[in-house]
Image: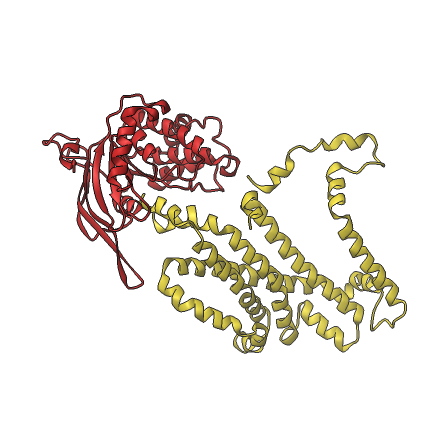
Amino acid sequence: MNVAEASPAPDSVQPFIHLDKVRKSYKARGEEFLAVSDVTFDVAAGEFVALVGPSGCGKSTLLKILADLHHHDSGEVRIGSPDNPFDPSRDIGMVFQQALLLRWRTIIDNVMLPAEILGLPIKQSRERARDLLAMVGLAGFEDRYPHELSGGMQQRASIARAFIHDPKLILMDEPFGALDALTRERMNVELHRIWRESGKTILFVTHSISEAIFLSSQIVVLTARPARMAALVPISLPEPRTVADKTNAEFSNYARKVYELLGMT
Amino acid sequence: MTFSSHQAKGKPPVDLAVDEPDSQPSPAWTSWWRAHWLAVLSHLAMVGLWSLASTRMPKFILPSPLDVLLALMNPRYNWPRHMAVTASEVFGGFALASIVGVSIAVIFSWWLFVSRAMMPLLVTINMIPKVAMAPLFIVWLSYGIGPNILITFTICFFPIVINTTRGLKEVEPDLIDLVRVLRASRGQILTKVQLPSALPFIFSGMRVAAVLAVAGAVVGEFIGSERGLGYAIMSFQSTMDTPGMFVALALITLVGVVLYGLVILAERCFVTADSRASK
């Protein structure tokens, strides 16, 4: 495995996220069910890391462990470093498969929700919310209600919401899984641009291998039954990336490698 | 967006009708009429049939609509006083049930063990016919407005607590996670996410309760009261004053209709049109 060569940070600098032999099991109907085992990888600040693997490989569980919504049984999870401190209550933004917008709030008020909960200054946050909505292509839709927007637009709003409190880490759990294929391609291009402009660290769970390759600087491949981590694949495709890159030989090589690691070839 | 603002769009201005004062009612009125003329017709038909039937029966069995109208106008009956008593019991019991019902549902959602212990108990208590408890309440609270509020409360409480509990449970778990990540307090999760999500459920509980509320107050007045419309019906029964009983019935219904109407109105104000449509 190429764990060693994948390590993105120089040895002297502590990585932003450090996972070491993370393990988590559930008890269901008396039987122990291993959700995550032996997951070890580092993420440098500003990286885009995709977690790929089949259903039941514990991708979402891993994300929830990072968000401190689940506890892990053993191993080490550390986020933040001395030169890049991390406040778990303010430095995480989340995006789920469903947009999860509050239907009684306008789009801008939905984006404002984390700012309200954290007690951030309302006036500045509102201006920031406007900028973020413009960034995700929703300028002019601030005062609409969620049901007036398409699924793709709702998901854009939920991405803007994840950025409102300027978190250092954004966790995305299959955010484009419920969108149609073409909308999904377009969202990939936009998310990649947003990531490059914002410089955030993003962890992104997906079933789609081409989505993972297109977006990432590093892919974590997980396998199911037994649920465990198979490998790390660093991606170095030229920037800026376009949809046309998906037809490159280089892109196909990465895809073949990931398929092999998943045991699908 | 609220329901009323949806309706406001796309209607021609009302002052068109000013030019021809006697031929055209306002457009708002015509569209209402177009939607409801059948309902109006069926109500009028019932009054017509009643009127017809009353000519063939003695007044103490079936008074005519005119007899009833005269009884309503007669100050001797003191209708406003009776109605005020019944209305305060109905509204008081209903308001109390709404506040307590929603609060208890919130407590259930916060502490699972409380809900596991208390919910089955509530279901058991709910099986007791509430009107049969009325004599007991009179023993406890003596005559007057108190026991009648309590009966109304017990009747209204259950649909509200059960619907609210369900509404609080059905909030998307990921949505709760989204705010929990931000270390939102229990109060923040409740006021910003859970309660607004549960509002359609709370209102459907309140609608059921509003229909039942009047029965509670009236039964209470039947057995232990010297005031109120329920008391009025009992006393007119002893004097065979059937027109008086009819008026009392109509006014009891009116109290119920007003309560129900207020609940619907509040629902339109607070629940967005799209989530009402999905319920």
Camera-side residue of A237 and A199: A237
Asked if residue A139 lies left or right of residue B111, the reply is: right
Residue A245 position, x and y percent, is 33, 23
Q: Residue at x 31, y 34 (%)?
A: A212
Q: Is residue B66 above or below residue A219?
A: below
Taking the view exactly as shown, the residue that stands out farthest to the left is A12
Taking the view exactly as shown, the residue that stands out farthest to the right is B56
Camera-side residue of A144 and A27: A27
Residue A12 location, quadrant: top left
Instruction: Judge whether residue B230 can be spotted in this image.
Output: yes
Q: Residue at x 60, y 37 (%)?
A: B5
Residue A73 position, x and y percent, is 20, 53
> Which chain wears red?
A
Q: Is residue B184 above or below residue B219?
A: above
Residue A136 location, quadrant: top left
Residue B221 position, x and y percent, is 64, 71
Instruction: Judge whether residue B78 can be spotted in this image.
Output: no
Asked if residue A51 lies left or right of residue B96, the reply is: left
Q: How many marks?
A: 0
> Which chain wears yellow?
B
Camera-side residue of A151 and A3: A3
Asked if residue A87 lies left or right of residue B48, the reply is: left
Check the image and tell me how it is coloured: by chain
Asked if residue A45 lies left or right of residue A110, the reply is: left
Residue B77 position, x and y percent, is 76, 66
Residue A20 location, quadrant: top left
Camera-side residue of A115 and A226: A226
Q: Residue at x 81, y 36 (%)?
A: B24
Q: Quadrant of the N terminus of chain B?
A: top right
